[in-house]
Image: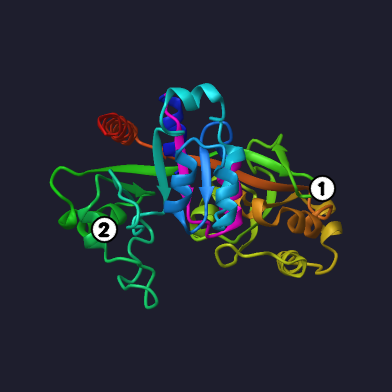
Amino acid sequence: TIYIAELAYGMGLRPLVLTRGYGSDEDRMLRQRLQGQAGVGAGVMRAEIAMQMLIPSSSVTSQAAKIGIQQHLDSTPYKTEDASKQRPYNYDVVILDDGLQHHRIVRDFHIVMIKCEQRFGNGHLIPRGILRQLPQYALETADLVVLHDRLQPEQVRGVAEAVTPHLPVSVRTVDSRFMVTGLSEITADGTKWYPSKLGDLRGCRVIAFCGIGHPAGFFSSVRQLMPSEVLCETQFPDHHDFTEDQLRNIMEKCSPHTPGDFAREAELTSKVVAITTEKDAFRSGPTIAKAFLPQVDHLLVLCGKLALDGVGAVAVKAILNKAVLLSDCR
């Protein structure tokens, strides 16, 4: 979602992102990452939010409050009177985050992303499995399929066998991956973070923890930064609100020699680093900082973004251009 919104903005378009709002962590991350580039509307009533945010009106905020819509108009860069007068809508393109099954809103294009390690889980629908829709029906409507982290040969074969039979002949598949952009240090109060002087994790003993939907990808990215030792990798459910006790228990578990004397052990050996994801830092930053600082030498956030192959970037741009042409014809 962030990739498409940033790409649209770079093309001179005005994107609006609509997210269902599964967790405040994701909403906050979207607003911060897209500040000045895209509007963000969060809430389950996405059709109503879209109507309120698309049409220029001085009564948008009061109307939204009456029907209980959560909006983030402060995140949109398109508030000037001139922009409203020149165009009938506040935005040129609307991006539904995780919206493949949101049938109340008619879509012009569908982009389906498949995480190659997970694929379709056990192949069953909720609650027996992870699927909200059988893959063959979702893939039939796809205009582009993005295969994420297709790294191993067995993954290439397995995904191709699972996906290809359900795709129209004209639909293209492209590859994407998570690209680490840097490390950031969390401040003592946990409300902000700033670029770290550490370029990688060489010479560091690492405590990695997260509460996200796909922890294996995060742990793999941490290991690629070449720490001298990974003391532990601890995962919690997606959108998990950490408690101080849980995080302190992680430190106790990671201290192999003298439980309860973690700070002294850190002094006698190489630097000890605790690292988590952006989403976790947005959700539980103050709790994380209180639990780990000053016991660890560095409290880090792994920062990154989605990267598509060259063919993928061209394909997404083509879809955005078609979306604008369709809008102009209406």
**Residue at (61% x, 45% y) in the render:** 302
**Residue in the foreground of this view, choosing between 182 and 314:** 314
Q: Quadrant of residue 324?
A: top left
**Residue denoted by label 1:** 188
| 14 within the magenta span | yes
> Is residue 310 rendered to the left or right of residue 8?
left
**Residue at (45% x, 35% y) in the render:** 15
**SS type, badge 2:** helix
Other residues around mark 1 within 10 Å, as few (<14) / some (14–19) / many (≥20) = some
Mark 1 or mark 2: which is in front? 2
User: x, y (%) of residue 180?
Assistant: 53, 40
**Residue in the foreground of this view, choosing between 100 and 117:** 100
**Residue in the foreground of this view, choosing between 83 and 174:** 83
First in sequence: mark 1 or mark 2?
2
* The C terminus, quarter of image: top left
Residue 138 disc label: 2
Q: Which residues are magenta?
A: 12-32
Task: Give the Cα separation between the discs numbered 1 and 2.
Answer: 45 Å
**Residue at (15% x, 57% y) in the render:** 165
Other residues around mark 2 within 10 Å, as few (<14) / some (14–19) / many (≥20) = some
Q: Amino acid at mark 1?
A: Ala
> Is residue 34 rendered to the left or right of residue 48?
right
